[in-house]
Amino acid sequence: MRILAIETATPIASCAVVDASGVLAETLLPVPMRHLEGLLPAVAEMLARLGLTPGSIEGLAVSCGPGGFTGLRVGIATAAAWARAREVPVLGVGTLEALARVPGVDGLVFPVLDAHRGEVAGALYRVGRDGGAECLAPPLVGPPDVVAAEAARHPGPVLVVGDGLTRHGAAILAALGARARAAGPDLHPRAAAVGLVALPRLARGERTGPEALRPLYGRRPVAWPRQETSG
């Protein structure tokens, strides 16, 4: 099964094509990102580079948040419209679950995104080397120490990933204690990971359905500030 994956929940957007053999291609959109202008041309260019047509896509996966309102809205609307027009299945994937998919990691992973205004979005997963992930603490948006405290309820070494570490790493690691280690703040949700999470689920017949796709905000909506360009 060949699927198109879309990740627009955060300022670094991307699209990818994956199948059972792995990631065929992935394109990162320029930063600062203009979701509306860049997404569909990036998809078209990527498909052309692979020698594929829109009709070659057998399913879609889209990152559903937590994330920025505009990005989530555009990504979900694009995936839903494509699925309806082409009559192919679509599946929503949690942004934090995709971020938790760190190659070679086996154990607890705490993906955390900077939600701005002094808050983060985080969740805790138990990840297997086969790529499977069990959610132990569902997505939550709030102060870094509060969100990390939810993850701290589960014993064992934990790997912390994501740009939430850039501003709030000290508070997050303090709440988790000595058992935590940071993978670095430069890891971002990627469309390739969204696709790899969704692929086996779509193959098993799981579907979200275009009409049922909804942003996942955690306990309350996250509004990422707009990225401004100079000049």
Image: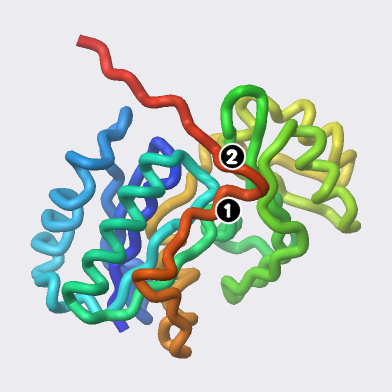
Residue furthest bottom as drawn? 204
- Element at badge 2? strand
Amino acid carrying label 1: it is Leu
Question: Which residue matches tag 2?
Answer: 113
Q: How is the image coloured?
A: rainbow
Is the C terminus in the top left, top right, bottom left or bottom right quadrant?
A: top left
Q: Is residue 215 shown above or below 36? A: below
Amino acid carrying label 2: it is Leu
Query: Which badge, 2 or 1, is on the more N-terminal residue?
Result: 1
Local crowd size for mark 2, using a 10 Å CA cut-off: few (<14), some (14–19), many (≥20): many
Q: Name the mark on residue 7.
A: none
Tell me what residue is drawn at x 45 percent, y 39 percent. 68
Q: Is residue 32 shown above or below 59? A: above
Compare residues 222 and 59 and report the one nearer the observer: 222
* Distance Cα–Cα, label 2 vs label 1: 8 Å
Q: Is residue 144 visible?
A: yes
Tell me what residue is drawn at x 74 percent, y 31 percent. 143
Is the N terminus in the top left, top right, bottom left or bottom right quadrant?
A: bottom left
- Element at badge 1? helix
Q: Are marks 2 and 1 in contact (CB under 8 Å)?
A: yes
Question: Which residue matches tag 1?
Answer: 96
Tell me what residue is drawn at x 67 percent, y 41 percent. 141
Residue furthest front as drawn? 211
